Amino acid sequence: MLAASILVALILFILCFNSIRATVFIVIAVGIIQDPIRKLVPEEPVFFVVIVGIFFATGMIGAMLRNGTRYFAPLSGINNLLYYPIVSFLIILLIQTFATIVRYDQVVLAIVGLSGYLAPLLALPLAYSYVNTLEDIKRLLAVYIGFNCFVALGVYLSFLGVDWAILQQVGQGIVIYDLGTVLTAHSGFARSAEIAAWHMAASVCMLGTLSAITNKTSQRLWFAFLIVIMVGGIVLTGRRKMLMEISIFVFFYFSILIFTRTTGTKVFVGTLILGLGLMIWLGLQEIFPEKYESQIDLYLQRGATVFEDAPQRFSNLGFGSLQSALQRVGWLGAGMGIGSQGARYFSDVSFISVIGGSTEGGLGKLIVELGIPGLALLLWLLWRINQNISKILQYCNVVDKTAAHLGVAISAFLVTNIFIFVVASQVYGDLFILLLLGMFVGILFATPKIFASRRSYVDVEEGTQKYANPVT
C-alpha cells in the first residue's frame, strides 16, 4: 500500500512539473482528498495540511524553469499597475518575517506565516497561464464543483449517523451549543465543518454563475439541484457565516452587473429561487424520514439567525479585533505567523498571552502580524487590484457577454471573501483555500487574454486605455 502510494505521488509530481494544466487540476484534487486521507493516518499528522502546497510548488518550479521570469508577468497587472504595491507589500512581509525569527527564534513559524500571504500571489500566474479559452474556465469550475459534491456527500452521511472515522472532525472538533440544545458541526470528509462549508458556499456561487451563462434548460435544472444539495450541506455544518457569504455574493453580483451594465440577471435570480425552494421542499418532505425532521428544523433555525447576529458579529470581530490587536501588540505588529491558525503546531511558544483573541477577526490578525504599515500597504494593493479588475470587466463587457458574466461573478466572490475574512479569519488559514483565491484572481486576469487575438484593441474609459495585450 505504501509503495503504491509513493508511486502515485511520483507520477503526480512528474505531471505537475511538466504541465501547468495538470498542476491546476491536481491541486484541486489533492486539496480536497488530503483531509480524508489525513483522518485515516494514525495521529492525524498536521503535515497533510500542506501537501497541496508541495504539488503546487512542483508545478510552479517547472513553469519557472520553462518560462523564466515571464511566469510572474501577470502579477504586474495592466500597465504595471500592481508592480509597486506588490513590491512594497513583499518588503513588509520580509520585515515581519525577520521580526519573528529575531524575537522568538521561530524560523518554521515565520515561514508558515509567510506562505499564507504568498500563496495567493504565487497561484495567480499559475491560473493565468492555464486559461486560454472560456471552456478552460468552465472546465475548471466544473471540476471544482464535482469534488465539492464529494464534500457535500460526506456531510450528509455524517448527519445520517454513518459512523466512519473518515467522517469525523480532526482533533476534538467543534460542538455547537445553541437553541437550548447541542448540535453537531458535521464536517463529512473535510477536516472541519468550517472548511466543508466554505467549499460548498463557493460551489453555490459558481453554480449560480454557470446557470446564468448556459442556454440549456437541462443544465439550469441540474445546477439548481446541486445548489439544493450544497445549501443543505452548509446548513448541516452549522457554519452560519457561509450562508451569509452566499447572500453577500448575490448582493455584489447584482451590484457589479448593474455597474458594468451586463445583462442576463433573470436567469440567475430564477435559479437561486428554484434552488432554495427545492432545498426546503426536498429537505423537509422527501429526502429524510420523519425521525430527522426535528433535527433539520434546529439547523434551519440556527441558520436563520445569521442575519440577526451579523451586525453584532461584524462589530465585535471586525473592528473589535482591530482595537484589541492595537492594544495588545501596538501599531508595528508582533511578527509573521504568530496570529496564524496553525501556530500551535509549529511552535512550542504560547502566543495566547501576547495576542489573546485578537486574531479571530481578520483585521486583528493583520495588525498582529503586519502592523498598521502592513495593513496600509495591503489596502493599497487591494485598491490597485480593484482598478485592474475594473478595466478587465469593462473590456470583457465589450468583447463577450459570457466572459463578462464570469468576470463579474468571480469579482463578487473575491469581494465577498474580504468581508467574511474581516469577521472570521480562521478558515483563511487553510493553504488550499488561499491557493484557490489566488487562482480565481488569475482566471479573472486571464479573461482579456482570450480575446486579444480576436480584436487588436478596445477603447474604454473614453478611449484613454488601449488593450493591445490587456494583461502582461
Image (cartoon, grey):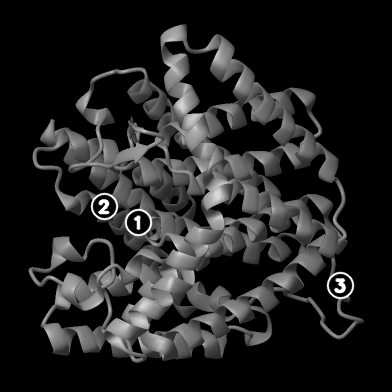
| Residue drawn 46% across the image and 47% down it | 198
Residue corresponding to mark 1: 430
> Any mark on residue 49, and which?
2
Q: Find out whether the residues at labels 3 and 1 contact each other: C-beta distance under 8 Å.
A: no
Q: Quadrant of residue 97?
A: bottom left
Q: Earlier in the sequence, mark 3 or mark 1?
A: 1
| Residue drawn 28% across the image and 29% down it | 167
Q: Earlier in the sequence, mark 3 or mark 2?
A: 2
Crowding around mark 3 (Cα neighbors within 10 Å: few <14, some 14 to 19, many 20+) is some
Q: Amino acid at mark 3?
A: Val
Q: Amino acid at mark 2?
A: Val
Query: Which quadrant does the C terminus fall into?
Result: bottom right
> Any mark on residue 458, and which?
3
| In-image side of 7 versus 133 (left or right) | left
Residue 127 in view (yes/no): no
| In-image side of 278 versus 354 (left or right) | right
Q: Mark 3 to mark 2: distance in Å?
A: 44 Å
| In-image side of 299 versus 324 (left or right) | right
Q: x, y (%) of residue 224? A: 67, 28
Q: x, y (%) of residue 291? A: 41, 10
Instruction: Give 62 or 383, whichever is nearer the viewer.
Output: 383
